[in-house]
Image: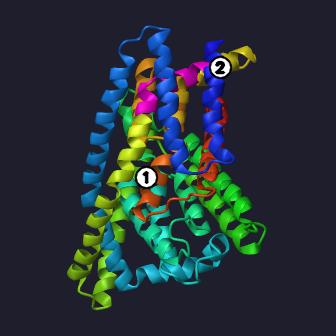
Amino acid sequence: MHNFLLFAFLLFFFLLPLHAIMVLNYIWIAFFIIAFIIALFRFIVLGDMEVFPAIMNSTFDSSKTAFEISLGLTGVLSLWLGIMKIGEKGGIVNVLARVLTPLFSKLFPDIPKGHPVTGSIFMNIAANMLGLDNAATPLGLKAMEQLQELNPKKDTASNPMIMFLVLNTSGLTLIPVSIMVYRAQMGAAQPSDIFVPILLATFISTISGIVITSIYQRINLFNRTLLLGLGGACLVVASVIWGFSQMSKESMNAVSTVGANFLLMGIIVSFIVSGMRKKVNVYDAFIEGAKAGFETAVRIIPYLIAILVGIGVFRASGAMDTLISGISWTVSALGGDTDFVGALPTALMKPLSGSGARGLMVDAMTTYGADSFVGRLSCVFQGSTDTTFYILAVYFGSVGVRYTRHAVACGLLADLAGIIAAIGICYLFF
């Protein structure tokens, strides 16, 4: 009975942000309160003498990890913000902004037509779609800084900020190279067999996020431009699915890896060439942008430490294990199939920590087998959504936004859509 009560309490915590409490402050407090309650129960009732040392060790480890992530981001941020500065001065960002204005003016009605942030948003989304996380983060931070310039209330998230953030947290990925590599390392017979399921699940998550956010922001989705834009995106995804389905697994891995990196190098070269055509001092422009990258990396350190320590404490207390046990008990009591429950830790960890979810994905493949239903489902979970709370902390923290409004609700609902889609699609495919 106590497991069920704890499950109900934890489930309430996860659903709470979908209603009144939409601020990271309350979520962060909940991590510690729930962790302490469960740890106290394990200490007093179960006699677990290791739980509190484990929690405290997690605070030190998470703080170190947060700093290492920030340190690692410094070089990448400096590189890509430097490249973006060349693109700005070379005019490419403005060209992208003009091309995308018809679609983005409907999806982001508060952004002035032709504003450079439109190009930055597109570059970030494109990097995410190609699975280029190291490029996507600095591009996203650049876009968020530009959105903050348009924001009339600097401490409160604007509608365009929230729509942009949900597009990131929904995790649209066309080429999940890293997941296929992990599957190959774990001995999967066909590492690429999760490609189509991931593509379908992440697409459903993204479309759901757009629809949910549009409802919150009263954006009319039934206009010709948005219908054509979203319909065209559906057609592109369908074409990619069809194209890759005609390839062997070796060809699929080769094409996806080479294609992603070719496009990335092509972006860098095109930006440099555009700067040369505009007679821009490309080197000086790069240095100017790179300096901003260093400053941004330093600025996000406190936010990263806060969110990763909270997640570490929640995990080390056994709260995540308790939640999974509660879900398994409930599904079993209702007569449902519990095959998917073994992969749920990856799904529930993904909104909190990308590295944590990656570790749980590898653990699921190690425990159940890379080609097992749980092993494959954990990979689809990993690829279908993104790290919602991490993105909230980093993106909003980088520009000093404190009040997130409906960002948490929309992000978590998009995650939920991706999780449900992943489960259904995996039952269909595997």
Q: SS class of the residue under badge 2?
A: helix
Q: In this image, 386 relative to 286: left or right?
A: right
User: Label 1, on which residue?
Assistant: 131
Three-letter residue code for mark 2: Leu
| Image position, residue 126 (x, y; %) | 47, 63
Q: Is residue 294 highlighted in magenta?
A: no
Image quarter of residue 47: top left
**Left or right: 166 in relation to 208:** left
- Give the residue type at disc 1: Gly
Q: Nearer the viewer, residue 427 or 341?
A: 341
| Distance from the alpha carbon under mark 1 to that under mark 2 | 39 Å
Question: Looking at the magenta stretch, what is its main secondary structure?
Answer: helix
Q: Secondary structure at mark 1?
A: loop
Region of the chain picked out in magenta, as a range: 313-328
Q: Is residue 319 magenta?
A: yes
Q: Which percent across, then down, holds residue 203?
A: 61, 51
Task: Identify whether 262 is placed above or below 197.
Answer: below
Q: Position of residue 206 (x, y in %)?
A: 61, 53
- Residue at the farthest bottom position: 279
